[in-house]
Image (cartoon, grey):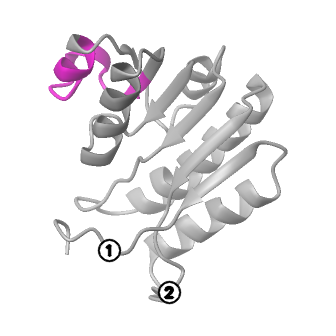
Amino acid sequence: MYLVVGATGLVGGAVAQQLRRQACDVRALVRGGSAHQGARPLLQAGVNVVGGDLRDPLAVAAACSGIDTVVCTATSMPAAGGDALQRVDQGGVLGLIVAAERAGVRRFVYTSFSPNIRIDSPLTRAKRSCEARLAESSIQSVILQPSFFMEVW
């Protein structure tokens, strides 16, 4: 079973939909659960939508239970305000990695961005710290490092 974190976003939604088209079992961790407006297409595709937030360790641990592969495309960008990048993109994803390890998840796919982009920012620090944590993890991981997403920039 796959857990897609960030499934109401553009990339995560496409990943969840494609996995369902391949008849994979998919769970999505969604803030607000099935009441979230972005959950409707997931539910229609047969995705198991569970309510939770990356900032809630109990919800994250529950979402990881019984999962073989985590796909994390979550980010608080581009609408991040205050310390959202630190709390969600860094602390939340680091917590997700720990929860995945504890749950016995075998694989973790993480969406970051190109290492050729060397801008010192909260997002860069968050992404690089999560990459480093995955590199030292016992979980088999794939770190995707695309260039800037043009719809954001």
Is residue 25 covered in magenta? no
Name the residue at 69% across, 49% down. 141
Residue 24: image x %, image y %? 47, 17
Element marked by disc 2: loop
Task: Kindly indicate the quadrant of the structure image that contains residue 16.
Answer: top left
Q: Which of 127 and 55 is in front in this view?
A: 127
Q: Where does the image place residue 5, in percent across and percent down from the top left?
A: 45, 36
**The disc labelled 2 sits on which kind of residue?**
Asn
Vertical position of residue 124 compared to residue 80: above or below: below
- Which mark, by number, is residue 79? none
Residue 131 location, x and y as percent? Answer: 65, 63
How far from the left and from the top, in percent, is residue 48?
Answer: 39, 12
Q: In this picture, is 61 found above or below 130?
A: above
Residue at mark 2 = 116
Check disc 1: other Cα within 10 Å, few if <14, some if 14-19, many if 20+.
few
Can residue 40 be found in the magenta stretch? yes
Q: How far apart are marks 2 and 1 (CA)?
A: 10 Å
* Mark toward the start of the polypeptide (2 vs 1): 2
**What secondary structure is found at the residue carrying circle 1?**
loop
Residue at figure coordinates x 33%, y 21% from the top left = 21
How many residues crowd around disc 2 within 10 Å: few (fewer than 14), some, or many (20 or more)?
A: few
Taking depth in this image into account, of 74 and 150 the one nearest to the observer is 150
Give, as a three-letter code, the residue at label 1: Phe
Check disc 1 and report the residue beneath it: 148
Q: Height in image: 61 above or below 34?
A: below
The residue segment tinted magenta is 28-43
Image quarter of the C terminus: bottom left
Q: Which residue is drawn at 29% across and 36% down?
A: 13
Residue 12, quarter of the rendered image: top left
